[in-house]
């Protein structure tokens, strides 16, 4: 039996979860109208195994089963970030800090472009439907949250678009709502790369016939990287090859020249129009709200063909209060690019992370105090420098507050981060605002305020480093078990814990 490759093959990923008792196959009939979403939310919030819905009401033989919570957290005993680690082919016990550092290491590897394979060896071509045979309304696309604006087929699939000159191919995630039998609508917003490519087509007079592909069940490494804010002009597929150590097998679409992962569960293809729009939303996004009536006209995708494999499986993310894929992937993977940006900019940053509890709106930076002191700077000067670097880059687009902490804080432990936040900064006095940078339109305090008209500001850098630490070492004792006593005493107490009478 060949070794499983969960980072390269979606079905191997599912098998690995099953082998680790991190998958529940649900054979009882479930309704894609809210029931699937409710089960997923309970699984997310309790760190339970991922649900695989094998009997979705209204599904045909091959279209489709649903995998929920593909990158949700799980129990610490199994490795709480195990599903994310499997997306990269890492040991399931790998902690998130090491996952971030591994992604950074892979940036120094030689890019490895995809390899084209024959149609006969591409499972996604086992069934081919022409435009007349495509019926989106007949698919059991999930209605995930009460008051959503429609059925969201696309929550964990991958859009593929390419510039007219074919020099840049972008693989990315953006939500997509079913409009009718042949159309999907979704967010195509600036400064996201999907919009930049669409604008490139519009610039040559073809903004209503932009080729696209939407792929589901792609290699897990591909869906993970498609969540990252990698630099403009870089093709995610080449970086994915570097991560995997082998080229991603791809095959040509039926109706255009785009290349899609050959092992995809399903592929929808056709054209995107910036001119033809439809009301999209509302939708329960990554910050945990559905605002009734909050909908906007968005561009339309016309589906002109569909290909899929036997017994196709649709991966689904159901965003909400942490923790789901919008935090574990979109949120935490911003940290990878943030750490790289800090290093490239010469900032004295040891680590970067977007805490899940902050719904991916915070970026926490751990600062090397010795290097900070060598800069001979002030809190005000340093905060201004950090804000200018991050808030004027794509990396900082979704972030509204950058929190600076000293090296004694474990930034991957929100309890420690929040302790530093409430005890080491004076509100307002230790915060520097940035009113001329671009706001993140999905942030609730932006979308539900007058700021939604300007899309400017609402961002700040919060200094949670004591002022003395900018100049010299500043001694204090942390009053907790792990840091407040000698290692010898901590070890002794741990060893004798049961002797004391504790279980």
Image (spheres, grey):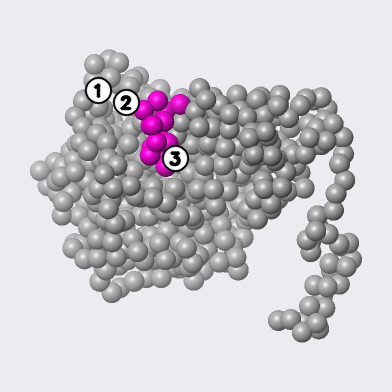
Quickly name the residue at label 1: 207
Callout 3 touching callout 2 (CB < 8 Å): no
Q: Secondary structure at mark 2?
A: helix
**Residue at position x 81%, y 83% from top?**
499
Q: Which corner quadrant holds the C terminus?
A: bottom right
Q: Quadrant of residue 226?
A: top left
- Outermost residue on the left side: it is 132
**Relative to residue 342, is residue 284 drawn left or right?**
left
Please state the extent of the stretch shown in magenta in the rendering: 441-456
Magenta span has 444? yes
Q: Residues under labels 3 and 2: Cα distance?
A: 28 Å
Which residue is located at x 21 percent, y 25 percent? 275
- Specify whether residue 499 is painted magenta: no
Q: Which mark is residue 198?
A: 2
Q: Which mark is residue 445?
A: 3
Please state the horizontal and vertical placement of residue 235, each as a whole percent of the image.
45, 31
* Circles 1, 2 touching at the beta carbon (< 8 Å): yes
Residue 386 vs residue 175: left or right?
A: right
Judged left or right of residue 122, residue 374 is right
Q: Choose mark 1 or mark 3, whichever is in front.
A: 3
Using residue 65 as the reference point, say whether residue 491 is left or right of it: right
Check disc 1 and report its element: helix, strand or loop: loop
Asked whether 269 or 335 is in front, the reply is 335
């Amino acid at each position: 039996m060949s070794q499983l490759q969960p980072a390269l093959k979606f079905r191997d990923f599912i098998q690995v979860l099953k082998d680790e008792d991190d998958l529940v196959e649900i054979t009882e009939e479930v309704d894609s109208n809210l029931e699937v979403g409710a089960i997923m939310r309970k699984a997310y919030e309790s760190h339970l195994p991922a649900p695989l819905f094998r009997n979705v009401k209204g599904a045909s033989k091959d279209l489709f089963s649903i995998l929920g919570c593909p990158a949700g957290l799980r129990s610490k005993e199994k490795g709480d970030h195990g599903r994310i680690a499997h997306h990269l082919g890492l040991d399931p016990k790998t902690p998130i800090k090491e996952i971030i550092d591994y992604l950074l290491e892979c940036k120094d590897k030689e890019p490895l472009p995809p390899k084209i394979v024959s149609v006969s060896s591409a499972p996604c071509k086992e069934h081919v439907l022409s435009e007349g045979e495509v019926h989106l309304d007949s698919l059991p696309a999930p209605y995930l949250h009460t008051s959503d604006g429609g059925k969201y087929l696309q929550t964990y699939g991958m859009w593929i678009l390419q510039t007219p000159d074919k020099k840049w191919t972008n693989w990315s995630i953006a939500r997509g709502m079913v409009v009718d039998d042949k159309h999907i609508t979704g967010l195509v917003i600036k400064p996201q790369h999907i919009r930049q490519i669409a604008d490139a087509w519009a610039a040559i007079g073809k903004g209503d016939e932009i080729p696209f592909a939407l792929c589901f069940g792609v290699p897990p490494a591909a869906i993970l990287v498609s969540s990252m804010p990698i630099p403009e002009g870089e093709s995610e597929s080449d970086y994915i090859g570097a991560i995997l150590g082998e080229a991603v097998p791809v095959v040509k679409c039926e109706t255009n020249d785009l290349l899609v992962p050959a092992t995809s569960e399903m592929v929808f293809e056709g054209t995107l129009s910036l001119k033809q729009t439809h009301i999209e939303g509302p939708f329960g996004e990554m910050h945990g709200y559905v605002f009734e009536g909050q909908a906007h006209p968005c561009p339309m995708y016309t589906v002109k063909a569909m290909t899929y494999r036997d017994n196709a499986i649709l991966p689904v993310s159901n965003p909400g209060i942490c923790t789901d894929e919008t935090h574990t992937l979109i949120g935490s993977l911003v940290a990878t690019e943030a750490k790289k940006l800090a290093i490239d900019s010469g900032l004295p940053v040891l680590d970067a992370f977007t805490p899940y509890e902050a719904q991916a709106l915070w970026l926490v930076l751990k600062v090397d105090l010795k290097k900070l002191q060598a800069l001979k700077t002030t809190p005000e000067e340093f905060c201004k420098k950090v804000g200018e670097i991050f808030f004027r880059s794509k990396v900082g687009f979704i972030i509204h507050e950058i929190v600076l902490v000293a090296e004694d804080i474990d930034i991957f432990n929100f309890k420690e981060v929040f302790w530093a936040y409430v005890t080491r900064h004076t509100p307002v006095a230790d915060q520097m605002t940035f009113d001329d940078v671009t706001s993140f339109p999905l942030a609730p305090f932006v979308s539900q305020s007058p700021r939604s008209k300007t899309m400017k500001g609402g961002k700040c850098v919060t200094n949670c480093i004591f002022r003395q630490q900018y100049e010299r070492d500043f001694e204090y004792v942390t009053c907790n078990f792990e840091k407040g006593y000698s290692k010898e005493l901590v070890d002794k107490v741990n060893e004798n814990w049961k002797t004391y009478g504790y279980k």
